[in-house]
Image (tube, coloured by chain):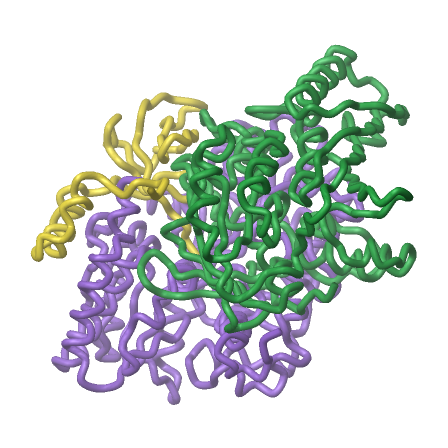
Chain colours: A purple, B green, C yellow
Amino acid sequence: MKFLDEYRHPAAVARLRQAIREVTTCPWVLMEVCGGQTHSIVRHGIDELLPPEVTLVHGPGCPVCVTPLELIDRAVAIAAQAGVIFCSFGDMLRVPGSRRDLAAVKAAGGDVRIVYSPLDCLAIAERNPDRSVVFFAVGFETTAPANATAVWQARRRGLTNFAVLVSHVLVPPAMEAILSSPVNRVQGFLAAGHVCSIMGTAEYGPLAERFRVPIVVTGFEPVDLLEGVLSCVKMLEAGQYGVENAYARVVRAEGNSHARQILEEVFEITDRKWRGIGTIPHSGFRLRPAYADFDAETRFAVASLAAEESKLCLSGLVLQGLKKPHECPAFGKECTPQTPLGATMVSAEGACAAYYHYGRLRGTAGVTPG
Amino acid sequence: MQLSDFENVTCPVPQADRDRVVLGHGSGGRLSAELLRRVFLPAFANETLSALEDQATVHLPGAQRLAFTTDSYVVRPVFFPGGDIGRLAVCGTVNDLAVGGARPMFLSAAFILEEGLPLADLQRIVGSMRAACAEADVTAVTGDTKVVDRGKCDAIFITTAGVGLVPDGVSLSIHNARPGDRVLVSGTLGDHGMAVMSAREGLEFETALESDVAPLAGLTQAMLDACPAIRCMRDPTRGGLASVLNELASASRVGVKLNEAAIPLRLEVRAACEMLGFDPLYVASEGRLIAIVPPGDADRLLGVMREHALGRGSAVIGDVVADHLGVVTLRTRVGGERVVPLLAGDQLPRIC
Amino acid sequence: MCLGIPGKVVTTYREHDLLMGRVDFGGVFKRVCLEHVPQIAPGDYALVHVGFALTRIDEAEANRLLELLAELGELEEVRAGGIDEVPR
């Protein structure tokens, strides 16, 4: 596959590994922001290719992990209603709510459907004029333009039986929250490459300046990730800070203005709650008043549904790299991948799930193999 | 058989719903195993069943050993590129017998039909079954049909049972693997699962990819003739290669190390998996087998497999080891290593 | 977040007044919305996420990176266009 296989080539990876080893003289803590990057690291086994001095902390960049519990409960409440066709990306189907998940709603007879693209929901709405089609609009800035386009199209095509349950979060405020924490130990960032393909790199300059950290726009394949690490470590070793782009084949400094136009049209910035972290101001999107009639929370009167996160869960500290998963008292006991208490165990990209998994092989996590 | 407690690291994890059947119970992963343990094994407990091989081998009076297996087929869509539910129902059961070293001989077929199913569809499916039986050299000798109200079953469900004879001296089992053994596969993996996915509503995509569904008794016979010391054979159906090897690692109390670069995958399967966020290691094949063989026999057996029409793409993909007992690992293309766990339920397409 | 993969635009067309394309991901073809990359043309590569093209892939930039890595001459086969998917 062109533009994919070349970035998984063993010789290229070996070359970069060597280069990183050569420039690293002291320990560094880096955070890769995006869950997709974490997935790639785990999938290719990239963690162990890095010199021991370089620690990768897995960031909160997974919309599955960070969707607040009450939003899952609202999704479940809507999906369970008669006459509703609830459409979602596959990732969200088995995220536990307070009592059950969307897959359980399906098992009980709810019409819950997996879609590949938000536009698919519009076709479903057209084919089922007497039913309500609700789409779970989840994601970072990468997915927001696609979701916005679906809403915009619904308006243009007069699809009044279509609604969206919005759970959009933004990356820079999350990074700022992490960097602002008095106990932050992340020294450099691998920024989310696909988020930047839309938003550009302008937002990261002020962050890099204010906190004096290197921020390297990074892709997702092994070569891209190691390129990102190399750039970041080089800057740290030289005492430099600022923004660099290590994913130039996809990311331009100005981003994608066409995509941002549709974002501007449909969404506005709002405060958002992040599971495991809490509310971060100005860290999400909501529908603009002009499109408020597409808001599922109002249409289905679920906006007042509230839920409480587990008090045992330390995922906020894990996300900031302040605690290791196996240092959490609930790890492996009350909290396992089957019975997750928080964000970082819910998703395979979450640090706790990754630790639970690798701990079996290396015997560190208190869960012995076999 | 003891199934280890493999943690699920698929994003995200199924809730343990205590009082209803969920789709994950049919995935071939951890939930399926739990259902067996909680509901079926206690009810039907006996030694043969509890060994949980793909087929049951029983002694008949007169010393012949009979292999006996059954499976239900509920695939959607019913007609998919490269085959249909009928062909699947014959090949699946034939293959469960064949991988146990049996020569498949007779099948039964029971149909549950939805009221309103076009007869032309039924004829097409039954025609596929006849052709598959001829290809597999088996005879469908008995069957049953029931019809249920419209909406009570999705078009058609088929249950087949098969019997075959196991020659003396043949004793394949997932308990037989030993450190040092090599893991062989008979061709590209995941063709069936992704071909079916390509036709599935909501996720459909355009491709020339076809299911690999095929009867394997001819191949298994050639393999056992050349190498009677084969430890075990399995077909990686639901749950894919990863599920089969996890079951083996657990049952034989060994570790398995796979080599990613050696695993044969069609470009279209890789591309479709990348697009939907699937891991090909968990995608079903219906015309492929995995074989665990003593190290000295591997190369010779590979040659024999490659000479057979259904084994042209055969390859050695890994080793059985004495490390990390019960765990399957993968050396990735770029030189890392990761665990390949048993999933709880089915893979779902992801955006993450 | 952000599973995005490269695909080659084969044809473009309009549907519901949106710019759409038929994109080839390696023998697997899918309908993709190209509304946010209006300059893209058949033959170009797009980075696709949830059925939408995020950007056009810049081949010159891609080559620049690969040339950097190929300095030792070990990567000739990479530049020739990718790895065999069925190992020998």
Q: From the top left corner, tell me how far across and down residue B299 is, in percent.
A: 42, 48
Pick the front one: A344 or B347: B347
* One can see residue B321 in this view: yes
Q: From the top left corner, tell me how far across and down residue A64 is, in percent.
A: 53, 60
Q: Residue A229: name its quadrant.
A: bottom left
* One can see residue A89 in this view: no
The residue under the point 50% across, 70% down is: A354
Total labels: the figure holds: 0
The residue under the point 53% across, 46% down is: B349
The residue under the point 85% across, 31% down is: B152
Task: Specify whether B56 is left or right of B300.
Answer: right
Pick the front one: A325 or C67: C67
Task: Specify whether A34 is left or right of A158.
Answer: left
Pick the front one: B276 or A240: B276
Task: Specify whether B131 is left or right of B210.
Answer: right
Q: From the top left corner, tell me how far across and down residue B213 is, in percent.
A: 59, 31
